[in-house]
């Protein structure tokens, strides 16, 4: 192997491969190498979306798409006008990979397996003579003239332009820091809440379709489905809070209280509705007659938490019980005592400070000819294919900048 390359890309994940393939295709005379520290690359692609690879999200308006990025919203607006969801779909379709849209807007390969995306990348890399070097751990990056000298566990390489696409890698962040970049400390984003509460203890798997959740003492609020898990709560309503609140919740050491409005109704309105039900369903048991389209098991737990007995009928509930039930429905408070990783998709907030990057080119403002793509920079998104879209967009713009 020649020790000198025109372009070296550090990181054999989604952003690294996408950048390499687009550079080599646009400019076949350039020699391009990917350095991957593992014995195989594309690991996050493999496990994403439960092994199906959530490639992107069916949101086609840049100003709407950016709202899914707690960090990066402002910076990504311009880049998304250059390359976004529609371009991603076209890119894969031109290479024989058809994507489909699911009900919630997430997009997957029609094959339903991430292997389709991996095979596509490996074939394209081979077709355009991208050299993929596995077990190459980068130890040092030194600017040298207009280019770089890169020390690795397998020896010394040189290049004219360097792309860093290593995701959340503390060792690489330290190397970038030594080159003068500011690194925003990493904290977890996209996690589920650990809650030990008898109202939800025995009902894992229950989904409330549309709730509002607030983190008490902050202005964090989100809406959407909520899933009761074996250890607490998950699903979009919770995951959005974890992403937008990543820094605030880390400061609180993941100990805080949330207020859940299970019916997205005002408490006063709820009390009046319950008063009507008291007359309409007078002879029926409260526990047995589920209201507001809530799951039966959840309704039962909220009724029991309102100090209404299992056998009690609507006619027999008093004013205090009515008020308590409306509180449980519209303002249930739960104590969060920790967090759990959401599936295998470990996402962090943090990385190269966005002020250090030109978002027209994704080039460093500190070191020329150094480019970034993917999660190595301080951009992260809510769940649903948005983190990959950031990777595709950044990598594509890097490829344009390098081959101009």
Image (cartoon, rainbow, N blue to C red):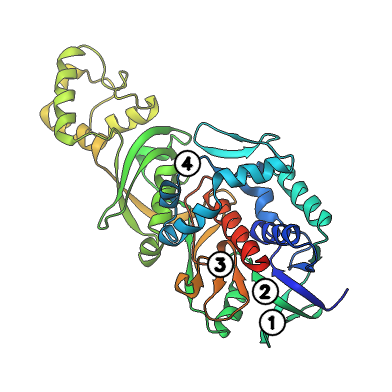
Element at badge 1? strand
Mark 3: few/some/many CA within 10 Å (<14, 14-19, 20+): some
What whole-number distance in Å separates the C-alpha atoms at marks 3 and 4?
Answer: 43 Å
**Could you tell me residue 337's position as x and y percent?**
39, 56
Closer to the N terminus: mark 1 or mark 3?
1
Element at badge 4? loop
**Residue identified by numbered label 1:** 147
Q: Residue pushed farthest bottom? A: 145
Of marks 3 and 4, the one in the foreground: 3
Q: Is residue 375 left or right of residue 121?
A: left
Q: Residue pushed farthest left? A: 319
Of marks 2 and 3, the one in the foreground: 3
**Residue identified by numbered label 2:** 162
Q: Are marks 2 and 1 in contact (CB under 8 Å)?
A: yes
Looking at the rendered structure, which numbered label has been put on residue 361? 3
Taking 29 as reference, is 98 above or below it? above
- Quarter assignment of residue 175: bottom right
What whole-number distance in Å separates the C-alpha atoms at marks 1 and 4?
Answer: 51 Å
**Residue identified by numbered label 4:** 229
What whole-number distance in Å separates the C-alpha atoms at marks 1 and 3?
Answer: 17 Å
Closer to the N terminus: mark 2 or mark 3?
2
**Could you tell me residue 329's position as x and y percent?**
26, 34
At x 55%, y 45%, the residue is: 85
Mark 2: few/some/many CA within 10 Å (<14, 14-19, 20+): many
Element at badge 3? loop
Closer to the N terminus: mark 1 or mark 4?
1
Of marks 2 and 4, the one in the foreground: 2
């Amino acid at each position: 192997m020649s020790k000198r390359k025109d372009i070296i890309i550090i990181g054999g994940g989604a952003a690294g491969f996408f950048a390499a393939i687009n550079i080599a295709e646009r400019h076949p005379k350039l020699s391009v190498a990917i350095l991957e520290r593992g014995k195989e690359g594309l690991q996050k692609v493999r496990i994403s979306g439960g092994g199906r690879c959530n490639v992107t999200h069916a949101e086609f308006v840049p100003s709407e798409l950016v709202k899914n990025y707690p960090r990066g919203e402002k910076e990504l607006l311009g880049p998304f006008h250059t390359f976004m969801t529609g371009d991603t779909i076209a890119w894969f379709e031109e290479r024989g990979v058809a994507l489909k849209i699911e009900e919630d807007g997430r997009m997957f390969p029609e094959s339903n397996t991430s292997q389709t995306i991996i095979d596509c990348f490996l074939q394209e890399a081979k077709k355009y003579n991208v050299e993929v070097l596995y077990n190459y751990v980068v130890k040092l990056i030194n600017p040298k003239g207009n280019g770089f000298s890169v020390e690795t566990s397998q020896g010394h390489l040189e290049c004219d332009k360097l792309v860093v696409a290593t995701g959340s890698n503390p060792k690489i962040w330290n190397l970038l820091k030594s080159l003068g970049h500011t690194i925003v400390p990493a904290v977890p984003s996209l996690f589920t809440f650990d809650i030990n509460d008898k109202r939800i203890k025995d009902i894992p798997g229950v989904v409330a379709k549309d709730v509002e959740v607030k983190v008490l003492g902050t202005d964090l609020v989100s809406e959407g489905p909520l899933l009761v898990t074996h250890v607490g709560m998950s699903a979009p309503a919770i995951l959005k809070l974890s992403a937008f609140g990543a820094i605030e919740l880390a400061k609180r050491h993941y100990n805080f209280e949330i207020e859940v409005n299970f019916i997205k109704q005002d408490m006063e309105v709820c009390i009046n509705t319950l008063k009507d039900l008291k007359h309409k369903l007078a002879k029926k048991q409260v526990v047995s007659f589920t209201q507001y389209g809530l799951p039966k098991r959840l309704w039962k737990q909220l009724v029991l938490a309102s100090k209404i007995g299992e056998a009690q009928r609507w006619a027999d509930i008093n004013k205090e019980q009515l008020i308590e039930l409306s509180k449980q429905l519209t303002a249930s408070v739960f104590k969060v005592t920790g967090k759990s990783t959401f599936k295998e998709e470990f996402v962090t907030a943090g990385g190269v400070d966005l002020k250090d990057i030109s978002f027209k080119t994704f080039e460093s403002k500190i070191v020329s000819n150094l480019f970034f793509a993917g999660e190595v920079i301080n951009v992260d998104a809510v769940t649903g294919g948005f983190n990959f879209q950031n990777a595709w967009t950044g990598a594509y713009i890097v490829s344009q900048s390098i081959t101009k």
